[in-house]
Every structure is written in C-alpha cells, then in structure tokens.
Image (cartoon, rainbow, N blue to C red):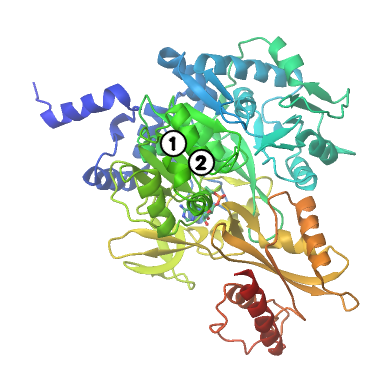
Amino acid sequence: MSETPLLDIMEALREVPSRVSMGSTGRITDMTKYHSIHGNSIIDIDSFWLDVTNSMITWRKAPTIGLKGSFGDVSNRPLSWFEDGTLNVTESCLDSNLKTRAEKTAILWEGDEPGETRRISYSELLELVCRAANALKSLGVEKGDRVIIYMGMVPEAAVAMLACARIGAVHSVVFGGFSAESLRDRVIDCDAKLVITQDEGMRGGKKIPLKEVCDEALDGDSSVKGVLVYRRTGGPVNWNPVRDVWWHDFVPLQPSECHPKECNAEDPLFILYTSGSTGKPKGLVHTCGGYITYTSYTHATVFDIREDDVYACVADVGWITGHSYIVYGPLANGATTLMFESIPTYPDAGRYWEVVARHGVTIFYTAPTAIRALAAAGDRFVSVHDRSTLRVLGTVGEPINPEAWNWYYDVVGEGRCNVVDTWWQTETGGICISPIAQATPTIGGSATLPLPGIVPQLNDSEGREITGEGEGLLCIKYPWPGQARTVWRDHSRFVSTYFGHFPGLYFTGDGCKRDKRGYLWITGRIDDVINVSGHRMGTAEFESVLVSHSAVSEAGVVGFPHPIKGSGVYAYVVTQPSEEWNQDLSEELNLLCRKRIGAHAKIDLFQHIPGLPKTRSGKVMRRILRKVAEGEMDSLGDISTLADPSVVGAIKDGAKKILYQSD
Ligand code: WTA
C-alpha cells in the first residue's frame, strides 16, 4: 500500500470543511502552488479546464472536449469550449446547492434605506426562479429568445436572469441608468421578445422611473411582445393592458417547479452591451459552459471563498461585474451573495462599512472610484463601524492608485485583510490578472500576476513582444473558457476589434507595465474608451450626440485624469459659424448626452475650439486632444503633418484656462 504524504493529508483536511471543492487542481494557498498550477494550466490547457469544470460544475452530459479553435482562426470559427457537454447553468447555481445548503442564505439584500433587508435561501431562490421561468414560458419566451432586463438592484433582477437561464433564453441586462434611447437601441439590436422591468428604482433616496423610460423606449413598433413589471415602490405608472403584466399578479401563480432546459455548452447565456472605441455599443455574447466554469473557478480562487463567508460585491447587475461576481460565480459556489441597492454615500459616507457591520461581511468587492471618494470623506466614517469580520477586500474597474490602495488596506482593512486588485473586462467574462487572496504578496497599484490559464503578453505598437521589464500593449496569448465568443450578429466586428491588431493574440485595449519581478501594472485604456468611475464609455458615443446638436459642427471627446472618477470626460467643441459658445449651450449639450446615452454620461469639461487638429488627409489627430486634456502640452510630438498647425496653439491656450479653473 502506498503511503500518502502527511502534508497532503493535512492539506486535504484543511480544504474539506470550509472551502469550495476545486477538484484535483486544488486551492492555491501559496506561491509554490500558484507557479505549479499556473505552469500546468498552460502545458495542458484542455486537461486543466476539463478537470476544473468537471469538478466544479453540474453537467447533464460531462464534456470530454476542451478547447476547439484558436486566436489565429477566430474569423473562420468562433472559439468553443466543452462543446460535447450539455448543462443548464442554474443547476450549478441552484439545484446542486440544495443538498447541503437548502436553508443557507443565497441572496442577502440590503435595500436603499439602511437596514432594509431581505434574505433568500437557496431553496427559496430555486422556487422563485422556477416560478419566474414558468412565467416567461407562459408569456411565450422560448429557448434562444432574447429578454431584456432593465431593473435596479432588487433580488428579482437576479431571479429574472436565472429564470431566463433556466429555460435557455438569452438575457441582456441593461443598466438602470441608461436612457430610453440606449434601451431602445439594445432592444432593437438583440430583437428582444420580452422586457422585464420595475415600476421605479431606488438609489440614494431618489426614485428612478424605470417603467416610464421603458415605455418611452418601446414606443411605436417593437419586437417586444410583453413587459413584466416588478413592483418596487408602488409609484404611479402608465399601464398598457395589452403588453404589461405585473410580476406580483402573475409570477406567484406559476408552478414552483420548472425543469431546467438542457443546453449545449456553447449556447448563448447572455448578451451584454459594452462601449468600444468606435460606433455603437457591442453586444458581447457569453456562452453557458465556459462562462459558468470560469466565473465559478475565478470567484473561488481569487477570493478564497469559504463556506461561512458573507460575500458582498457592491457593483450593479447591469455591468459584467454584477453578472459574474454577484450572480453567477458566487451562486455556483454556494456562497451567500449580498445585493446592495443603494450608493456608497447614502445616507453618509459610512454606508458600506455599516453594511459590513450589520451583515458580518467577510469579503468586500468595490471600485477604486468609490474608495477614492470615501477616503476623501474622512476616516471617521469608517472607524465608527465594526469591520472585524472582513478578510478579503477587492477592487475592479480601473487602475487603483497606490494612495487609494493603501487607504483601503490600512484604514478599511486595518492592515490585516488581503487586497485583491482584479483586472478583467466585459469581454474576458471573469478575472484574468489578480492576486490570489492568502497566496500572492501584494503591492498597492499592481494587479500582480495572471490567473491559471492566462498568459499575458506585452507588445509594442509594431507588434513586437516586450519580454522582461517594460511597458506595452496588453494582449493575452491563449484562449480561456470565460471569454466572449462573438459580438451579437456581428462576428467580423468581434474579429477586427480584438484580433485585428496583432494576429493570433487577443488585444485588450489596455496599456500595461511589467516590473522586474514580473508583476503587472495596468496603466489604463490606450484606445478611445474612457473609464469614468469604472463605467466604460466610448468617446464616439459622446461625439455623435454632440454633433447631432444644430449649433455644433464638429466635436472631439477624450478622457482626462480625474482625482475621484479616475477619468473625466473632456469635450472639444467646434460650433457652427453663426453660433455663440456659452454656458447655456454646454448645459444643453450635457442634457442631450443624458437623454441620449444615460444618467451616467456627463461631460466634465468643455472647450470651445476654432477647429479640430486634422492631418492633411482629414484625420483627427486624437493624440493632441488627449495630451492637451491631460495637461501634457509640452510633449505633443510631431505635429508637422497637420493641415493647420496653428489650431494647436489655440487649443493649448484655451485648455490652460480651463484646466487651471477646474483645479
Ligand atoms: C479597466 C470591468 C486597471 C480596464 C470588469 C479594462 C482595470 C476595463 C481593472 C474593462 C483593474 C478593469 N486595474 N484597470 N483592476 N479592472 N479595468 O468591461 O481598462 O466595464 O479594459 O469590465 O476596465 O471595463 P469593463
């Protein structure tokens, strides 16, 4: 009989009682294990991910095939993972938890008013999801149909997502701050059959008229056959009796069981729209098997999830962070996941820490913009609340500056919590570069090292690989299961956006530095995407709104460093010859952005300029606009190809006044 080394037995004993099972790949508890698991994951990518998925995910038919396709061939064949497997992701998120966690809280909800709480156990959540799934079926929704979810942060938003997944319908959640026009664009683009919304949302004591915006979006011809309306506030709404159905009248009457639809691993699970550098937002498509594998694996790994954790990610389900790390990843791991309806500063800047104390939160995940705003409000808002339960603190959405990181670590975490700065994107589906709590030594400002399965590559702009210490454009070398497969009904856009820069590599759109110990430091977007308070916005979206105003002839929009929001929005505007530039016009333009894009789309600084800096061939030299807005006026580079170099002087002079005033 062979002997099991004592250390392995101890490790096994340590893992069983409190942690999510990770199969033979095991937990990453130290850096030796990290290097060995990361190394193995790359040597045999198929075995690694098949092992992860078959030990973490509930499959109807277990997959035997890992990856099919390659980055070099995405134009001919979308990537696929586990393609001979079938499953329904809700079985991993719900049914599989009933054996040991039926009474455990699945969703812990903290409403807008402090202390307004709901607890939904795994068995209750399954029942709610089944009833909602049956309601969708009764309303004519079938496998593959698209359903738009336009809601605030109520548990029913997660129920709606899971109900779609239960019957194989494809959800597309639209953040509740988006305008009617943005909502309409998404309804049209994905040809939605049904919309799920609520009467009003609540955020920071204010009501958000979700149903009203939805009515406006669906005005006129629409593919939408029904609107299911959850009552949150009881506020007045207009009612279309042919189309609208109250959730509380309809869903509770449905049967409490709903057989999960068997889906192929590569059937779409959801579409999520995100801003890119050009054109309208793209509908990124995530598929069932790979996405649930990747979100559950990364959630368990990065946060070191344990059975008794109270896990709080305070993002919104309208963004990818909410999809992957409020709903799918945590539920697949049987965790208690908190949904937070309010904002960090309501009723005061201590709200997050009040939530931590009230619910005994052990893992807390937020964005750098919130950390900076709360640090600026002062430590006393933190210290009055008990944070002794906290063990892991996460950040996501934008680069975190070392000062903010240190404040999070020292003041919020009292110097005893692991801080994980997690880099990823809507496109990646889940975290790709991040410390692993309990294992990776951290330095404030660095996302540190790639997770298993991920091999980053830094390139210079000519496509040459930068090895060792250096700075370049962040690419990823090999596919991983959680990555988006395509852009909804526009595969060529997917191919050109992500694989058109460097053949055979996934290009992220971010800049990145590698230090001498191999740690990665994300420097931010290098394309025309601006990350405002962790919300991704395309400069082209702003520009098209601005030029649609009759007083504007041309516009150029760029980001600029903002002490709280990370990036602010800076608009250069050229008016029509007959038009005057004044404060009223800038306010009007901002109202227009709000109306056309959404409540979160605000231009911080306007500059009226005589003309955009264009090359002789008519191309706007965006580099100049960016540098000037960043205050780097003396390093504009070569401007000799400009048709009229004198505009640069005018732009610089005007900017100096604006940047000086805004200080
Ligand atoms: C940025 C959010 C630095 C980055 C999950 C990326 C980050 C974009 C980090 C994706 C981080 C996200 N450090 N930058 N830890 N996390 N980003 O699609 O520019 O809303 O490309 O996904 O956010 O934003 P998205």
Q: Residue at x 28, y 23 (%)?
A: 16
Q: Is residue 352 left or right of residue 166?
A: left
Label 1 element class: loop
Quadrant holding the N terminus: top left
Using the image, tell me which numbered label, if any, was put on residue 385.
1
Instruction: State left or right for residue 109 relative to residue 309.
Output: right
Cβ atoms at labels 1 and 2 below 8 Å apart: yes
Q: Earlier in the sequence, mark 1 or mark 2?
A: 2
- Residue at 82% in and 71% down: 582
For residue 520, above or below residue 638: above
Callout 1 amino acid: His
**Ligand 1 lies under 8 Å from the Cβ of mark 1:** no
Q: Quadrant of residue 279?
A: bottom right
Q: Is residue 87 visible?
A: yes
Which of the two residues, 295 or 238, is positioned nearer the viewer here?
Answer: 238
On the image, the x and y values in percent for residue 61 come to 47, 23
Q: Quadrant of residue 362?
A: top left
Task: Tell me where residue 460 appears, x and y as whole percent.
Answer: 45, 71
Residue, disc 2: 350
